Image (tube, rainbow, N blue to C red):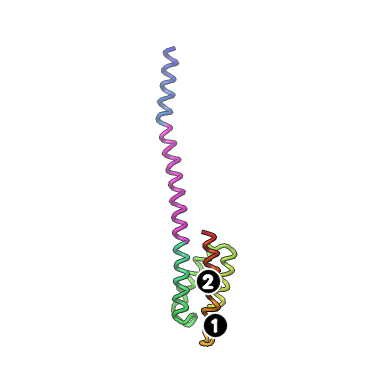
Amino acid sequence: MKNLDQWILVVIACIAVIAPCITTYLNNRHQYKIALLNTRFQRNINYIDNYFDAVSKFIYHNGPFNNENPAYKSALQKLYIIANEESRNILNDIDLVLMNPDNWNPTTKLNEIIQPKLNELSKNINKRL
């Protein structure tokens, strides 16, 4: 009987050592996943903010005839990576409007053309987040 008691004590001691290790591992893995999701979410928010900022600068500085074009294109490509298919179609429409030189005539009301598309993009991106 003494021998059996010793084995039971050894098993309990092993479990007492292994259980906290398993708990710590599972906890750390869960915290890593949360941190990864937070990082991805923050990156997506930054891409969205950068895109809308680049669009406003692009429009303010006379569109395709200025030096804001590379910043706008870079922001567009980054947002394109995280966008779903519907948002990509809206982004393409916005890009076509902005790159069309006819839309930059003083008689054309660019704001009336572009604003509904930007609103649609905002709603679509908001659904995704």
Q: CA distance from mark 1 to mark 2?
A: 16 Å
Asked which secondary structure carries label 2, the reply is helix
Residue 22 position in % (x across, y down): 44, 36
Q: Give the mark count.
A: 2
Whether residue 33 is situated above or below residue 7 in the rendered picture: below
Disc 1: which residue? 103
Asked which secondary structure carries label 1, the reply is helix
Whether residue 117 is situated above or below residue 82 in the rendered picture: below
Q: Quadrant of residue 66?
A: bottom left
Disc 2: which residue? 118
* Amino acid under disc 1: Asn
Q: Residue at x 40, y 30 (%)?
A: 17
| The N terminus, quarter of image | top left
* Amino acid under disc 2: Leu
Q: Is residue 87 left or right of residue 31?
A: right
Residue 59 position in % (x across, y down): 47, 78
